[in-house]
Image: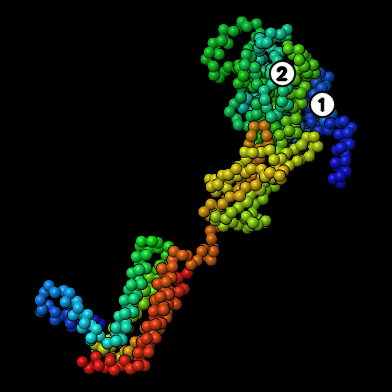
C-alpha cells in the first residue's frame, strides 16, 4: 500500500544520521513526485476523514457524549469511510497489482461506492 | 324546586322557628334510667325536639324499640343517660355500641362514679377512669354547694360557643389516653381531684400521691370531664363524666359569682357536635388533569404539570344543607408511590368558595401513583381521599431530537457524506480525463 514510501525510507539511513528534517523533506518530495494523482486524491480524502474523526472524538471526551447515538454514528461514519477508502487505495495501487489480479480498479471503485452508500444509509438512520 | 326550597326556608326563618337538623339523620334513641326524671332534663330534650329531632325514649332494660335490627341501626343517634344502670337489655352491650359507631351512628354517653358496663366501654376509647366510687371534688371556689358539685370554666374550643359561662359539673373525671382520635371538650379545674370521701380524712394520701404524680392520680387540669371521640368513619361519641351536666337543675342553678350557668348552652353545643351538626366537612369531588386541559387523562407522563382540584363543603346547620367551605388553610396534597414523592399545600382558591387547587410537576419517576388528601384536625370531620393514576415514561418518539450539543457529530457525518460524493465525482472525472496514462506511467516504471 505504501510502497513508494517504504522504498524511499530504506535509502536515507545511508546518509548523515541527524538530518531528520532533510529526511522528512526528502520523503515528501519523493511522495509528490512518485505517487500517482489518484492515490494523492485518496490520501487527501483519508486525511480529511482522520481530521473529522479526531475532532469528534476530542469533542466527545472534552464536552459531551450526549446524545450517544449521534456520537456513535458520526464517529462510526468516519471510521467506516476510512476503512473503505483505505481498501480502495490498496486495490487501485499499481504496486499491488500482483495481489489483486482479478480486481480491476473500476470494480474496486464500484465496491467502494456501494459500501459507502450502505454505510451512509445506516449512519443517517442512526444519527437523529 | 330550588326557589320553593329557599322560599320555605325564608318562611321558616320569618316564622321565628329555628329548624336545625343533623347532617346524618334526625332519629334519636334515648336510653333513660328509670331513676332519672325526664322532667329534670326538659331543657335539653325539649331543645333537641325543637330543633327537629325525633326522640324515642326507652328504659335500658326494655328490649324494644331495638337499637338495631339485622345489623342495621334504627336510629341515627343514641343517648345513653344511664349512668348507674348495671344491667341492660341484651341488645345493649359495649360491643353493640361500638358496632353502632362503625355504622355511622353517634353516641352520647353519661358516666358516673359507679362501676357499670359503660365504664369498661370508656376504657376501650382510651379514657382511664379512677377506681369506682371516686368522684371529682374541689373546695374552690368557696360556695354553699357540697364539694362534689363544682363550677367548671369552659376553655376555648371550636366545638363550643365562645364565652360560654362556667358550667356546673358533678361526676367522675377521666385521664386521657394517647389515642389521637380523642377530642377534649371540658377539662377539670386545676384545683380539683378525685377522692372517695368529702371529709378530707385521706388528704395525706392525696398529697403524697400528688408528690409522686403519674398514673393512678386523677387531679388537676390535665384530666378530662367531657371528652369526644371521632372515629375514622367520622361517627362521633361523647363521654360525659356526669349526667347532671345536662339537667334542668344545673341549667337554672346560679354560679357562685351570681351569673347564669352555661350548662344549657354547653349541652346544646355538645349535642350539636356529637350529632354531626357542627364542624362537619366532606369532600364533594376531586379532579385532576394536565395543565391547559380539562379532562383527566388515562395516564400521565413523567414531568407533566398536573392540576389537582378538590371541592369541599361544610354542613350548615341553619339551612340543613351542605355549603361550599373555603376555611381550611393547612391542607396538603401528596403524590405518593409508597412514599410521598410530592407533598405540597392545597390552598383554597380565592373567589371560588369550596374550591382548593394546586399545580405541581409530576416527579421524574414512572409507576402507579396516588393523589392523596388527608386532613385530620381535632373536632373536625376527617377528610381523606385517594385517586390512583399511572405515570408512564416518555414514548420512544417523544424524546427531543437534533439537540444542539450534537451538532459536531451531525457535521461530521454530513461532511463525510459530502466528502464521499466530491471524492467520487473527482475520481470519475479523473477517469474520463485519462488519468490512466499516469497510472500506466507508474506501472511501467
Tell me: residue B281, above or below residue B188.
Answer: below
The answer to whether residue B91 is visible is no
Identify the residue at horizontal 75%, vertical 20% (top origin).
B263
Gap between marks 1 and 2 measured at Cα: 20 Å
Chain bearing mark 2: B
Please state if B216 lies on the left or on the right of B445 as rendered: right
Tell me the number on the disc at residue B166: 2
- Where's residue B73, x and y in %? 76, 36
Q: B140 or A113: which is nearer to us?
A: A113
Residue B230 tag number: none
Of the image marks 1 and 2, the number of the one nearer the N terminus: 1
Secondary structure beneath dot 1 equals helix
Q: Name the quadrant containing residue B270.
A: top right
Q: Is residue A87 above or below residue B72?
A: below
Q: Mark 1, mark 2: which one is toward the viewer?
A: 2
Q: Which residue is mark 1?
A: B47
Residue A55 lies in quadrant: bottom left
Q: Is residue A104 left or right of residue A66?
A: left
- Circle 1 crowding by C-alpha within 10 Å: few under 14, some 14–19, many from 20: some
For the residue pair B395 and A47, the one nearer the viewer reads as A47
Residue A71 point in image, percent of width and height: 40, 67
Amino acid at each position: 500500500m505504501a510502497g513508494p514510501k517504504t522504498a524511499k525510507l530504506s535509502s536515507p539511513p545511508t546518509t548523515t544520521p541527524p538530518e531528520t528534517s532533510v529526511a522528512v523533506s526528502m520523503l515528501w518530495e519523493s511522495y509528490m513526485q512518485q505517487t500517482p494523482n489518484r492515490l494523492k486524491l485518496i490520501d487527501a480524502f483519508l486525511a480529511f476523514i482522520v481530521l473529522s474523526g479526531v475532532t469528534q472524538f476530542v469533542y466527545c471526551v472534552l464536552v459531551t457524549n450526549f446524545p450517544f447515538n449521534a456520537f456513535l454514528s458520526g464517529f462510526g461514519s468516519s471510521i467506516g469511510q476510512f476503512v473503505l477508502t483505505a481498501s480502495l487505495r490498496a486495490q487501485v495501487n499499481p504496486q499491488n497489482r500482483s495481489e489483486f489480479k482479478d480486481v480491476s480498479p473500476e470494480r474496486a471503485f464500484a465496491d467502494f461506492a456501494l459500501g459507502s452508500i450502505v454505510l451512509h444509509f445506516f449512519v443517517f438512520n442512526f444519527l437523529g | 324546586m330550588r326557589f320553593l326550597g329557599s322560599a320555605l326556608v325564608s318562611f321558616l326563618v320569618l316564622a321565628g322557628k329555628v329548624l336545625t337538623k343533623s347532617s346524618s339523620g334526625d332519629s334519636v334513641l334515648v336510653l333513660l334510667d328509670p331513676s332519672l326524671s325526664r322532667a329534670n332534663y326538659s331543657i335539653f330534650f325539649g331543645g333537641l325536639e325543637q330543633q327537629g329531632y325525633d326522640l324515642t325514649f326507652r328504659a335500658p332494660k326494655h328490649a324494644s324499640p331495638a337499637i338495631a335490627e339485622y345489623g342495621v341501626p334504627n336510629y341515627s343517634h343514641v343517648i345513653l343517660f344511664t349512668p348507674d344502670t348495671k344491667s341492660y337489655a341484651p341488645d345493649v352491650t359495649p360491643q353493640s355500641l361500638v358496632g353502632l359507631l362503625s355504622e355511622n351512628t353517634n353516641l352520647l354517653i353519661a358516666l358516673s362514679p359507679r362501676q357499670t358496663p359503660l365504664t369498661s366501654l370508656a376504657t376501650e376509647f382510651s379514657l382511664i377512669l379512677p377506681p369506682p366510687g371516686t368522684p371529682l371534688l374541689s373546695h374552690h371556689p368557696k360556695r354553699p354547694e357540697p364539694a362534689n358539685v363544682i363550677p367548671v370554666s369552659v376553655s376555648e374550643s371550636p366545638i363550643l360557643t365562645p364565652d360560654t359561662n362556667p358550667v356546673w359539673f358533678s361526676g367522675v373525671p377521666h385521664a386521657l389516653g394517647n389515642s389521637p382520635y380523642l377530642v377534649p371538650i371540658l377539662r377539670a379545674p386545676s384545683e380539683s381531684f378525685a377522692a372517695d370521701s368529702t371529709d378530707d380524712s385521706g388528704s395525706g394520701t392525696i398529697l403524697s400521691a400528688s408528690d409522686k404524680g403519674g398514673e393512678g392520680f386523677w387531679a388537676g387540669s390535665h384530666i378530662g370531664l367531657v371528652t369526644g371521640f371521632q372515629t375514622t368513619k367520622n361517627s362521633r361519641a361523647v363521654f360525659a363524666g356526669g349526667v347532671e351536666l345536662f339537667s334542668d337543675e344545673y341549667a337554672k342553678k346560679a354560679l357562685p359569682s351570681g351569673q347564669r350557668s352555661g350548662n344549657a348552652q354547653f349541652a346544646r353545643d355538645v349535642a350539636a357536635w356529637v350529632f354531626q351538626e357542627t364542624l362537619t366537612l366532606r369532600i364533594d369531588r376531586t379532579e385532576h388533569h394536565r395543565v391547559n386541559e380539562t379532562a383527566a387523562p388515562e395516564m400521565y407522563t413523567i414531568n407533566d404539570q398536573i392540576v389537582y382540584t378538590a371541592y369541599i363543603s361544610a354542613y350548615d346547620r341553619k339551612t340543613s344543607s351542605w355549603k361550599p367551605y373555603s376555611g381550611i388553610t393547612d391542607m396538603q396534597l401528596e403524590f405518593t408511590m409508597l412514599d410521598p414523592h410530592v407533598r405540597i399545600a392545597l390552598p383554597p382558591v380565592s373567589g371560588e368558595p369550596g374550591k382548593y387547587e394546586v399545580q405541581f410537576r409530576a416527579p421524574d419517576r414512572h409507576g402507579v401513583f396516588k393523589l392523596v388528601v388527608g386532613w385530620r384536625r381535632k373536632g373536625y370531620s376527617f377528610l381523606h381521599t385517594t385517586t390512583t393514576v399511572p405515570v408512564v415514561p416518555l414514548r420512544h418518539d417523544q424524546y427531543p431530537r437534533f439537540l444542539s450539543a450534537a451538532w459536531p457529530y451531525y457535521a461530521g457525518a454530513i461532511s463525510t457524506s459530502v466528502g464521499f460524493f466530491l471524492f467520487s465525482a473527482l475520481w470519475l472525472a479523473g477517469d474520463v480525463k485519462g488519468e490512466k496514462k499516469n497510472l500506466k506511467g507508474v506501472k511501467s516504471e
